[in-house]
Image (cartoon, grey):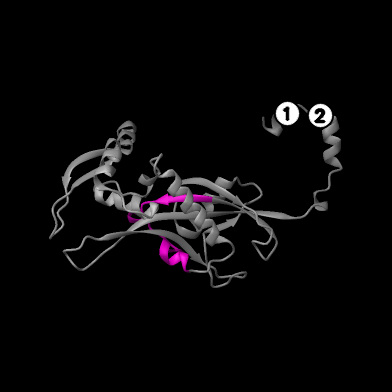
Amino acid sequence: MSSKNRAADPGEEEFLSQYHPEKYASISITVDAIVVGVAKNTTDNYRKLDRQSLKILLVKRDNYPYKGYYSLPGGFVGEKETFEDTLKRVLSDKTGLSDIYSEQLYTFGSVERDPRMRIVSCAYISLVDISRTNISGAEWFAVEEVSEMELAFDHNQIIEEALKRLRGKINYTDIVFHMMPKEFTISELQEVYELILGKKLLPAAFRRTISDKLEDTGKMTSNAGHRPSRIFRYKVLLQDMQGNN
């Protein structure tokens, strides 16, 4: 029940009139976004297929603390904002992204995680199809690059936790399709699973596992130097599109 809808309590009103929040330590709250996507690394060798890589979106800090360091897109929660409001504002202002899949990851509250003051961060995982994004003010980095970088604050740890979440959910949810283009081959989809899980999968077993989630488009690839492959799309996405027509 919202506090606005509760019946007035004279005892509580008196308590609040004498309450002094300034007696307590000042703590601020921020929202940080771990934006994850998959991009193709193209090759000039027509006999080799373009490979994919898992990427994280980072921004370079213009101000202290950690001036010149890369960090996750983030910002302070406004007094009249929800966490989700702040997330949308941060993504729009710092990356140009909007209307993308996001879910709350974890709250990070180590005492000395920020040199300015006590700051607690609510982190979100946001998943995108990079091919359909128009990024402004931020840069994509391969996960392997990020692991070798010293990021601002505790953002290396936050990214590690985000990748653990993805690995944990990929086998029992359809979360991966938020990073896929509308149409793809099974090999491309398997490669994304392998990137996230960090291991190779048996093609036959993967096809059996994933087949019920896919719709055959009836199209074939036409890569020079390679056998054509069937092109699929995510079945639930297709149903959603049909339902909205």
Does any portion of residue 184 appear in the rendered image? no
Type of amino acid under label 2 = Asp
**Which residue is nearer to you in this view: 110 or 27?**
110
Residue 148 at x, y = what percent?
47, 68
Which quadrant of the rendered structure holds the N terminus? Answer: top right
Give the quadrant of residue 43: bottom left
State the separation of the CA atoms marked 2 and 1: 9 Å
On the rendered structure, is 233 left or right of 170?
A: left
Q: Residues within 10 Å of mark 2 (few under 14, many from 20)?
A: few
Residue 33 at x, y = what percent?
51, 54
The residue at which mark 2 appears reads as: 9
Q: Is residue 45 above or below residue 203?
A: below
Q: Is residue 40 above or below residue 231?
A: below
State the SS at label 1.
loop
Which quadrant of the rendered structure holds the C terminus? Answer: top left
The segment highlighted magenta reads: 124-148
The answer to whether the residue labelled 2 contacts the one labelled 1, judged by CB atoms less than 8 Å apart, is: yes
Residue reaching furthest to the top: 7
On the rendered structure, is 182 left or right of 63?
A: left
Q: Residues within 10 Å of mark 1 (few under 14, many from 20)?
A: few
Does any portion of residue 60 appear in the rendered image? yes
**Image point (55%, 70%), residue name:** 62
The residue at which mark 1 appears reads as: 6
Residue 194 at x, y = what percent?
34, 52
Type of amino acid under label 1 = Arg
**Which residue is nearer to you in this view: 45 or 3?**
45
Give the quadrant of residue 217: top left
State the SS at label 2.
loop
